[in-house]
Image: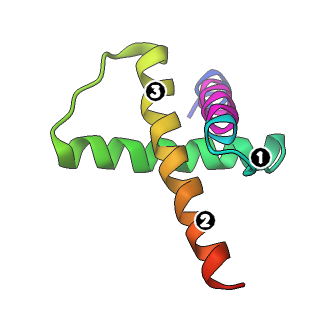
Amino acid sequence: MTLEGFLIICLIGGIAGWLAGVLVKGYGFGIVANILIGIVGAFIGSWLFTQLGISVAGGILGSIIVATIGAVVLLLIIGVIRKATR
């Protein structure tokens, strides 16, 4: 992976993690955690969209949309686990 590719992944992950934190109130974890949540969310979103047979436009905007939806799903799962362990 090139440095440019790594920086693009971090940028998309950061944007997606931040958007997911805004959409799912109360689950902002800081910039580093948001980037990680966005990157993991990208994998979840990509898998989920493939399973549902949904295709999103390519490019950075499409990647941000898919990663954000995946990150929202991840944050909702984290929220359920947190509530279950209280």
Q: In what quadrant of the picture does the C terminus appear?
A: bottom right
Q: Residues within 10 Å of mark 1 (few under 14, many from 20)?
A: some
Number of numbered discs overlaid on the protein picture = 3
Q: Which residue is mark 3?
A: 65
Q: Amino acid at mark 2?
A: Ile
Foreground residue among 80 and 31: 80
Where 40 falls versus 7 (above or below)?
A: below
Q: Residues within 10 Å of mark 2 (few under 14, many from 20)?
A: few
Horizontally, residue 74 falls left or right of residue 11, namely: left
Horizontally, residue 69 falls left or right of residue 48, namely: right
Residue 28 magenta-drawn? no
Gap between marks 3 and 1, in whole Å?
Answer: 18 Å
Furthest residue in direction left, as rendered: 53
Q: Amino acid at mark 1?
A: Gly
Residue 9 magenta-drawn? yes
**Which badge, 1 or 2, comes first in the chain's sequence?**
1
Q: Are marks 3 and 1 in contact (CB under 8 Å)?
A: no
Q: Which residue is mark 1?
A: 28
> What span is in magenta?
8-19
Q: Quadrant of residue 76?
A: bottom right
Gap between marks 3 and 2, in whole Å?
Answer: 20 Å
Q: Amino acid at mark 3?
A: Ile
Residue 37 spot, x, y in % from top left = 63, 49
Q: Secondary structure at mark 1?
A: loop
Residue at 47 percent of width and 15 percent of height: 61
Q: Which residue is mark 2?
A: 78
Residue at 31 percent of width and 16 percent of height: 57
